[in-house]
Image (cartoon, rainbow, N blue to C red):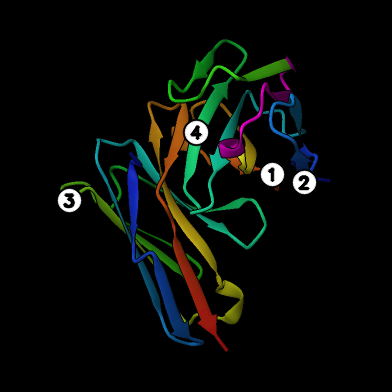
Amino acid sequence: DTAVSQTPKYLVTQMGNDKSIKCEQNLGHDTMYWYKQDSKKFLKIMFSYNNKELIINETVPNRFSPKSPDKAHLNLHINSLELGDSAVYFCASSPASLGLVEAFFGQGTRLTVV
Amino acid sequence: SQQGEEDPQALSIQEGENATMNCSYKTSINNLQWYRQNSGRGLVHLILIRSNEREKHSGRLRVTLDTSKKSSSLLITASRAADTASYFCATDNAGNMLTFGGGTRLMVKP
């Protein structure tokens, strides 16, 4: 069983479109995250979300919006896609108190905006 | 800017040799973690070291932490071709999220 699963694995779309990436975890974790990995492999946190609070990284454009229908899901919706949004997006989850435990990552979604 | 910075950015060694990667960070931390990423895959947790620990072992992995220098190192002993991957250090941010460095790309030649 996959602990953290993302769909789709690959996404190619045109500029200006709106798209969503789905993430589900079956680990019973309280906290989920979205990370962006650019072409140079730098990983940047985008959002951290748990039952109580959504923490938004201030560098993330408001075209990006996380949506969590329940504790096991955290989807990422992107409006008006731009070329610079091309990257690999990773979903992750962890129990609360991340500093004491590890994060579990999905396999990533490679987004290509053309 | 990244909280953690790995050094070197790329490392190429022969199978059987040891590989050492370093990580420096800027602010106080609670813990530091190392992750591995195979090409085209997600990150996998390797080891966590707490701020009050100086050294930790896990199989062929050895991690050190020097909070006075704000640095950590990951040593992989007796490397194997299967160790070829990118290795990232990550620091926690008040328990809410991990901040990653740029990674070290390790290639182990058979």
Secondary-structure class at tag 2:
strand
Q: Quadrant of residue A12?
A: top right
Q: Specify the subunit that label 1 lies on.
A: A
- Residue identifier under label 4: A45
Q: Amino acid at mark 1?
A: Thr
Q: Specify the subunit that label 3 lies on.
A: B
Q: Rounded to the nearest whole Å, what is the CA distance between mark 2 and mark 1?
A: 8 Å
- Residue identifier under label 3: B69
Q: Magenta residues?
A: A69-85
Residue A102: x, y in percent? 54, 42
Residue found at the far right of this picture: A1
Q: Rounded to the nearest whole Å, what is the CA distance between mark 3 and mark 4?
A: 25 Å
Question: Which residue is pictured at 25% across the width and 53% down the height?
Answer: B71
Question: Which residue is pictured at 83% across the width and 46% down the height?
Answer: A1
How packed mark 1 is, by other alpha carbons closer than 10 Å (few <14, some 14-19, many 20 or more), is some
Tell me the tag on residue A112.
1
Q: Rounded to the nearest whole Å, what is the CA distance between mark 1 and mark 4?
A: 19 Å
